[in-house]
Image (spheres, rainbow, N blue to C red):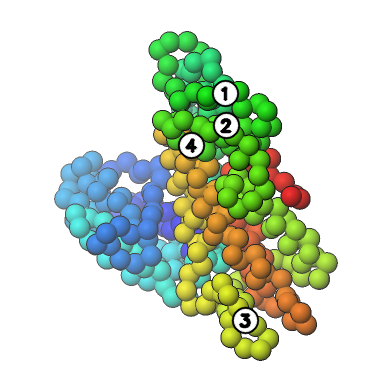
Amino acid sequence: MTPAELSRTVLDAVRRAVDAGELSVDLPERVTVTEPGPGGCGDYATNVALRLARPAGQPPLRVAEILRARLLDAEGAEGAEGAQGVGDVVVTGPGFLNISLRARDDLLTGLVREIRERGTEYGHGDALAGRTVVLRVPYEVRAEVVADAVARIVATQGGRTEIEHGEPVDLRPVPAPEDPAPLGPDAARWALLHPAAHDRPRITADHLVQRETNPLFRVRYAHARVRALTRNAHDLGFAAEPGELGSAGTADAGGPRAGAHPASTSHPLQTPLTDHPRILLAAATQHAPDRLARHLLTVADALLPLLPEVLPVGEEKPTAAHRARLALAEAAGAVLAGGLSLLGIDAPEHL
């Protein structure tokens, strides 16, 4: 079960509680699920009970217990998408619902499938549907670039943006110390968007260096390598298929290769890929494209160690594990491509 499916499952539990007269509230448009916080447990957590307590006129713990019962009601939830994947629900703190998924439910495989289905639109939603965001910015190159990126990101959440100029402004990032145009369009935009709005951007040739010390290079290189692996896999006669990653990196002579990830542990890519919808929404509502830029770097850095494990080595034949690793790499590549596009930066096929 993916986070999006779980969100819909929790929303369905609220709907069934309302239909049964246990809660008297308007259905929320969406339910957010995140990793459990301090004191939490399980795979995911949601604060929906705390959000609904006041309008329901009931204590948060009572609302949480109502929803807990509904989430565990396998018979009543039979029609809910993915509901069969809920294994246990624990109420902690003032009313947080901590949800454990059944062991047979492969979280990473479901996540990869969802990303592959949605492609570069993974993480897009309707949280800002019907809203118009008005940005008043000064006539300054960084402000213009930031406003353009914010408009693109707001659109992913169903909103629209109107950009105006003049005082008083409500979006005034620290100006660039010099003209970034000599860096070229991609490096210039990264130089202006990667730092937080209150940080002074660096307009230096470091953004053009093709080395791992250059964050932009790492992001674009990771994407280009995924595209190359897809082409190479095609030449070897296999394609991506989500599934178990296996003991990645097992050498012919026995023992794991450096960087291997045991099948029993979650892959380092799982958390940043799961977080992508949340990051997009935060970047849209906070008018902070730097959050997306830094997130893409996190995805790239988690992806790069996987890439040497995707293709067979030597006399090794392609297996289901190779197809699964390629599917995971392609899912991460889709997130990188979509994110770079929102920043107005090219995602290269070759680099």
Q: Is residue 252 above or below residue 213?
A: below
Give the mark nearest the N terminus, 1 or 3.
1
Cβ atoms under marks 3 and 4 closer than 8 Å: no
The tag on residue 195 is 4
How far is mark 1 from mark 3, CA to CA?
50 Å
User: Type of residue at label 2?
Assistant: Ile
Nearest to viewer (mark 1 / mark 4)? 1
Cβ atoms under marks 2 and 1 closer than 8 Å: yes
Nearest to viewer (mark 2 / mark 4)? 2
Residue 37 image position (x, y, % from top left):
30, 57
User: Type of residue at label 4?
Assistant: Pro
Identify the residue at horizontal 51%, vertical 42% (top origin): 292
Is 244 or 191 nearer to us in this picture? 191
Report the residue marked by disc 3. 250
User: Type of residue at label 1?
Assistant: Glu
Cβ atoms under marks 1 and 4 closer than 8 Å: no
Callout 4 crowding tier (Cα within 10 Å): few <14, some 14–19, many ≥20: many
Cβ atoms under marks 1 and 3 closer than 8 Å: no
How far is mark 1 from mark 4, CA to CA?
15 Å
How far is mark 2 from mark 4, CA to CA?
11 Å
